[in-house]
Amino acid sequence: MSPNDRYASLVAAVGYLPPVLREEDYPELLPVARRAIDDHGTRVGHRTRDAAELGPWRRQHSGHAAKRGLREVHYGPCDLSRVFVRTTGGWITAPWVHLPLVHAPFADFTWDHARRLAAAAGLDDANEAAVAASWTRRRAEHGPDLRSARGIGRTRAVSLPAPAPTLS
């Protein structure tokens, strides 16, 4: 009997029970990028994330020579507010350093749109502080355009907590 046949027969006999995930298991489900941690934190998707807890890990080799010493950083594409950095001591949550400038849900597609608008306005779209400030200023002056409103609506829909299951 092959391992797959054996597994299928056991599931048929006993049933399938999915494993219960703990809070520290959820970052494992997010996309991963390999990044260095420098004096300013770590950059994923043209955005810098930093936390005081990253202090001992700055400019340190991860111990994985095959990965060029880069650290494992998990990020949510629908929530750029933070990333999760894997260390030997566990996960470190590093928030986006310019998040206080934005005051709204912000996803990757919203960031890309804000960068395009900043470039069209003649700003340096690689300067994340300028892009965030431009986005906030534009929304304050003109209100959201239709495309921005759709992006924010999609971001809010994704970032809402899942409803609690009801027991009947």
Image (cartoon, rainbow, N blue to C red):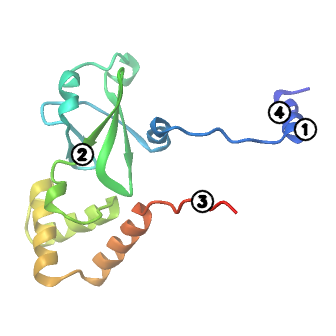
Frontmost of labels 1 and 4 is 1
Image position of 36 with respect to 27: above or below: above
> Which residue: 33% across, 59% down?
108
Which residue type does callout 3 highlight?
Pro
The picture places residue 63, in percent across and down from the top left corner, at 34, 16
Kindly report the distance in space between the C-alpha atoms of the residues bearing marks 1 and 2: 47 Å
Task: Return the disc, 3 or 1, that comes first in the chain's sequence.
Answer: 1
Q: Which residue is tagged 4?
A: 7
Q: Which residue is tagged 1?
A: 13
In front here: 126 or 145? Answer: 145
The picture places residue 2, in percent across and down from the top left corner, at 87, 27
Q: Secondary structure at mark 3?
A: loop
Image position of 64 with respect to 132: above or below: above
Q: Which residue is tagged 3?
A: 165
Task: Return the disc, 2 or 3, that comes first in the chain's sequence.
Answer: 2
Which of the image's four quarters has the C terminus?
Answer: bottom right
Frontmost of labels 3 and 1 is 3
Kindly report the distance in space between the C-alpha atoms of the residues bearing marks 2 and 3: 29 Å
> Which residue: 26% across, 62% down?
111
Kindly report the distance in space between the C-alpha atoms of the residues bearing marks 4 and 2: 42 Å
